Amino acid sequence: MVKKAFIIAIDGPAGAGKSTIARMLAGKLGYVYIDSGAMYRSITWAAMRAGFSLQDDKKLVALAKETRLCFKKHDHQMKLFMNGKPVTKAIRTPKVTANICYIADNLQIRRLMVKLQQKIGQAGGIVMEGRDIGTKVFPGADFKFYLDASAQERARRRYREFKARGVKVKIQDILQDIRIRDHKDKTRMVSPLKKAKGSIVIDSSKLTPEQVVSIMMGRIAGSV
Ligand code: DC
């Protein structure tokens, strides 16, 4: 039985299963699940809609400063609200994904996001996933997991998801896209994706989500 309100950080590359795992783990622990990527996606989407050049750092920062982001309980889970409205699937389109680097590479915007994430999670009882949670947002987190999987396996998983939804895609294109995202995430000048000091690395390539969660639960329960 885990009683303490821990701060649990999960980082890793795109498609490693972080959201599924973080949601399941938070559910088991009765914690709040926070998807930090949704925050970067929302600002990107808002900037695209505003119509100015995404290379205009001044306008990007001004927009990020005036955008109100908050997580609220909605349909039994924590949902991101932007300026009072629930954020929809619109933030998950390939176009938004392709443009996120303008936001994620901006130091001032990252500072704003990190501050907000720290405020949300400081009381504990939280599972937060992203790219810099264990390195920048909560370097002192009670548990820092780095969830990895081979690029091929991540591409296969995405391919199966698309196929199930009836979307026609080529697995080679997905793999190429994953490699591009990995490169962007790992070579970012500010807060690149890397294993946090003291993080527990789990390679999920050959594991089911249940097995990953069980490993995590074992590490958490074993330490209390
Ligand atoms: O988790 P995701 O794929 O929805 O995240 C989208 C992008 O947001 C990711 O490619 C990089 C950025 N991101 C970030 O820079 N830092 C985070 N903590 C989370 C996401």
Image (spheres, rainbow, N blue to C red):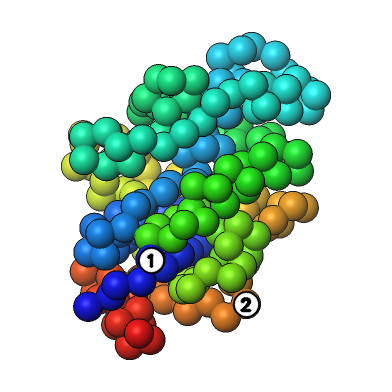
Q: Position of residue 146 (x, y in %)?
A: 49, 70
Q: Position of residue 118 (x, y in %)?
A: 57, 52
The amino acid pointed to by label 2 is: Lys
Between 188 and 174, the one nearer to me in the picture: 188
Total count of labels: 2
Check the picture and name the quadrant holding the N terminus.
Answer: bottom left
Q: Is residue 167 above or below residue 136?
A: above
Residue carrying label 1: 5
Q: Earlier in the sequence, mark 1 or mark 2?
A: 1
The amino acid pointed to by label 1 is: Ala
Q: Is residue 150 above or below residue 24?
A: below
Crowd around label 2: few <14 · some 14–19 · many ≥20 (10 Å): few
Residue carrying label 2: 197
**x 41%, y 37%: residue:** 71
Q: Is residue 93 above or below residue 162?
A: above
Q: Position of residue 12 (x, y in %)?
A: 50, 62
